[in-house]
Amino acid sequence: MRKFTQAMLVLLAFLGSTIGAVAQDIYPVAVDANATITHSTRSFTGITLQPERGVKQTINVKDGKYVYNDMTSTANGTFTAKVGQTVAARFLANYTNWMHSFIFIDKGNDGQFNVTSLQDANDDLFEFGRFGNVNGKQPLINSIPTFSLPTTAGTYRMRYLVYWSSTSGDALPTTPIPAGNTGMMRDGGVVVDVNLQVLAIDVNFVDSEGNALEGGSYETAPVCGQAFTFSVPNKSGYAASVSVKCGANFSESQTSETISWYTSTTLSGATTSQTNATFYNWEQFTPTDNGNGTYTVPADKMKGDLQITVTYTKDVMALIKAGKQVFRLKNREYAETYPYLMADHVDATTSTGKVNTGTDILYHAALDANNACQLWRLKPGTTNETYYLCSQGLQAGTINVDENVVVKMLKSGEPYKLWSQEISGTTYYGFSRSTSGNKTDKYFLHAIAYGRTHQDGNYPASQKGDYVTRWDFGTTTNASHWTFEAVDEIDITIGTSGYASVNYDFPVKFPAGVKVYKKAQEAATYIQLEEIPAGSDGCVSLPTGNAAFVADTEGANITLEILLDEPEAIDGGTGVNGTYLATTFNETSAANVYGIAKVDGVVAFYKMRANTTIKQNKGYIESTTSNAPRMELTFGEGPTTGIESMLEDNSRRESIDTSVLYDLNGRRVLYPSRGIYVTASGQRIFLK
């Protein structure tokens, strides 16, 4: 059976009895509610609580003269902290020594502060000053060690106590209120009751720009002092690097404060050596990568709220294999002459003694940065680790036919095996027949110098550059080595008409503010365009194969972002036809093909002349209603067959809405002067 000392009985009496005007059963105190401090030189103004990863909080007491201060019902009577968080409690007084201090928290919320001994971790006595009046050392009120809060979220009663607790020199180590009490009022003792709100830890996932990320997860709620494991949102084709901020007020600069206290390794003696701890408002670090898509914050780093920042970096090869990343293919052998693999419409029949067996072929040429014929994507094949090599809506053909056939671009090509080889620190890739998983198989995608012949002399050649065939050399042959260069943007230039047209076999996004148009309707005399609405980011995005017209200043250069994922489909499509490869229209096929042009100063849709070629990646209108030489370009509602009104003075404006006007290039005009304009309703008017 535990033996209680006289000092312990004093403590229990103080915590559990009622005296004077505060007679109560809940959280009693052994002092009159109106009692004031009578010590002539000691004053007391408040208390503080400072979380290890957080911001110091202060509760000031009324007048600073009362022995008992119940702050629980006041507006400034609550401290907040996180579950399991380490904190430092301090007193605001004009003196530092000759008094002991104690911190109680009612863990059980039973209306009592239950204490059996200093050694019992289950008691409501959380911490106390362990230094003072031992071996002649003075007790210090703010020498309370740091301590950890309850691990269950909730609101608790918390009591701060300053008390003269030792005259014998050895009573302090055994009980928080020892024998020899000389009176709370005369000694300048104080009791402060406050609310302690212990909150769950907030976990936020953000990207490198600070934007919220959806999809982060964890199975167990985080608690300070306990290891915490989480998963970050997955982003296909990207590698994630993760950093963690732990604490509070992450947007503010990092601050720190050093907390010091005296303690001893036992409860029976004191030490003159200080223990120091540096408290920061937040700390940033890299969590442990578990290698399975999860990360762990170690227990010694779990000290507050968590802001988990995920920085995504392109895993280019993963994106290429997934068919998302657009890239160029550069050949090792011909890196200084014609390095880039290209798909194009080439007529090689004029090469002496070498007749091309097809027209759409692969060849390699010098860099043409804005030519989409040099841009490629892989499409996964039906067999694992096989791919189709795609460009301009076509697929590279077979590479294992007889030797006099170049690799052609077809609507339905052959899948290849993709292999890699590191040479002098550089990784090169190659393509071999999909029927073999062994890269020593001798059928490779292989670049050939222009005019080179084989023993049979049957290799066809391109007049635009060097050509590509299958070759039966091994992987050590340089001309079979290709490197991938990721491409994320492509440029267009606005023509003299104030328009350009685009059509790509990959999705693109225009810069904010650039106007992009689709066909709204057509009649015998006009084609009406309608602006494609921008997305929430203010930019227009075109899905793969959606041709459109772009308006801007003549000669303007516009950079388009090549997207990794398809944007939302355009409602009803664009109604605009497009080319991938350069396409020549004969007299029959050109009969109802129209493009935007500026002729004699007039911007309109003009009929395509016979045997005219539309360049690659352009848009045009294939009319179903007209084959007239010219069709008017209109916007808004209704046709414009000519100048319908001449507004010579302001009185004429009453019959026509001129609040919104466009020039003949489709651009909004805020301050019109003399000239021809198009109204929002599609009427062409002349302003004098």
Image (tube, helix red, strand yellow):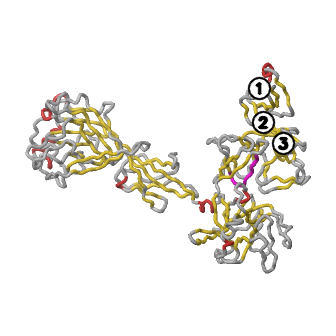
Residue 572 seen in the current view: no
Farthest residue toward the right? 587
- The magenta span reads 500-507
Tell me the mark number nearer the camera, choosing from 2 and 3: 3
Numbered tag placed on residue 605 in the rendering: 3
Quote the CA–CA distance across marks 3 and 1: 25 Å
Residue ranking furthest to the top: 651
Q: Is residue 502 magenta?
A: yes
SS assignment at label 1: loop
- Residue 518 at x, y = what percent? 75, 43
Mark 1 sits on what residue? 657
Which mark's residue is nearer the viewer, 3 or 1?
Answer: 3
Q: Quadrant of residue 433?
A: bottom right
The three-letter amino acid code for the residue at tag 1 is: Asp
The secondary element bearing badge 2 is classed as strand
Alpha carbon separation for disc pair 1 and 2: 14 Å
Query: Which kind of residue does numbered mark 2 sit on?
Result: Phe
Instruction: Tell me which amino acid carries mark 3.
Output: Phe
Q: Quadrant of the C terminus?
A: top right
Camera-side residue of 29 and 139 = 139
Mark on residue 520?
none
C-alpha gap between disc 2 and disc 3: 13 Å
Secondary element type, mark 3: strand
Percent position (x, y) of residue 494? 74, 45
Residue 85 image point, x, y percent: 33, 47
Depicted 389 relative to depicted 371: above or below? below
Percent x, y of residue 431: 67, 70
Q: Which residue is mark 2?
A: 635
Q: Residues within 10 Å of mark 1 (few under 14, many from 20)?
A: few
Please name the residue shown 30% across and 31% down the image: 73
Q: Is residue 466 magenta?
A: no
